[in-house]
Amino acid sequence: MTEPVVLDHDSACLRGNPLGDPHRRPVEVHLPPGYDGTRRHPVVYWLPGFGAHPSLGNRALTFGTSVAARLHRAMTDGRIPPALLVVPDCTTAYGGSQYLDSAASGRYAGHLAEVVTEVDRHFATVPGPGGRAVAGKSSGGYGALVAGMTTTLFGSVLAFAPDAGFEHCYLPLLPGALDTVRAAGGVEALLARRDTGPHDVPFMVAMSLIAMGMCYADTPTTPRDALPCDPDTGAFRDQVWQRWLRHDPVRMLPAHAGRLAALRLLHLGVGERDDYGMHWGVRALHTALDTHHVPHTYREYEGGHHGIEHVFTEALAQLWRVWGETETGACAA
């Protein structure tokens, strides 16, 4: 497996973003076996989860190999179609963007669209949504779902343990996050630990809720005011929570069912006992998709939120039936 190509993308959408985050972003591109720049290949856009490095080249654990190496081997063996694997950088100062255009965090949906254009310009790709899939885990799975709902960029969506059913995946985390904020000395004191640590699980959970509040804000705001409850008193802010809920895929579905139904592939997967309650939210989304007659595949697998990289290959194998021979490298450029 060769080293990835890394594009240096100057993002017009991220210039002057509210958090002052960089507008120059790397785009990691893993080339498929046999790529020669002449034959066109489809593209899988992989969206990392909250707090993850924007890369498929790193191993999650000491054991095993990277996700990129696993998928490259699966392409070589013919288990999944040969395709470019593209990883955009949509991280923010608070850890993640949810791949949304946010008044408080920046225009990351727009940035993702820019990346698609940039990849088509630099590489021999199958143009158009039919030759593109978007996939990801956790916040990345959420971003893939929302991209499938709100854009026509992608013809296939694969979402693993996506944020959905916000009452299940966010509300139960709030009390512990408030304890972490109070122990740190307040929201600003917690944010000051981004560079110094410790970056333990309670810190990451609290940071994730702060990030979600910023992503789901419809006006510029502060991390403190973006939370659905007062971090000092715990008083619930229903108006803020309702803003969050407008971004819940379960609630978004009725308005976007037609677009999802037009996808060539929609796959949902989740662990049976997800550490963050994602399994109940994804079950609710699965039920809602059935109610709205949206074709999709659904799988629950053993385990929780972490260590699920082995399921990616099986899910991506479904792209054989939607891409076929024409869109897996047989077209002349």
Image: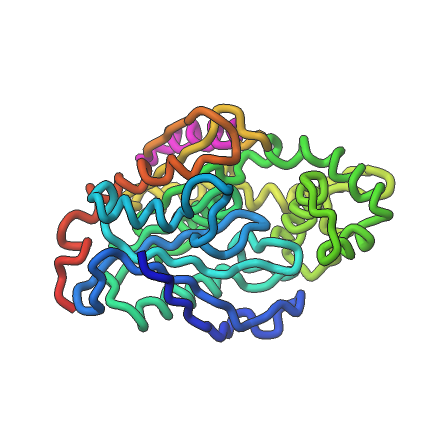
Q: Residue 254, can we see it?
A: yes
Write down the region rendered in magenta: 279-296
For the point 60% across and 34% down, which residue is it? 169
Q: For this rendering, which residue is in front, 226 or 294?
A: 226
Position of residue 24 measured from the top left corner of the image (x, y, whole percent)? 53, 73
Position of residue 20 measured from the top left corner of the image (x, y, whole percent)? 66, 69
Relative to 310, is 198 above or below?
A: below
Relative to 288, is 39 above or below?
A: below
For the point 52% across and 47% down, which residue is it? 49
Determine which quarter of the picture holds residue 245: top right
Q: Which image quadrant: the N terminus?
A: bottom left
Relative to 293, is 215 above or below?
A: below
Position of residue 152 measured from the top left corner of the image (x, y, whole percent)? 35, 56
Position of residue 68 in the picture relative to residue 111 (left or right): left
For the point 69% across and 42% down, which residue is it? 200
Classified by dominant secondary structure, the portion drawn in magenta counts as helix
Position of residue 57 in the picture relative to residue 306 (left or right): left
Position of residue 332 measured from the top left corner of the image (x, y, whole percent)? 13, 66
Q: Which residue in the rendered view is the most extreme toward the front?
A: 62
Q: Which image quadrant: the C terminus?
A: bottom left
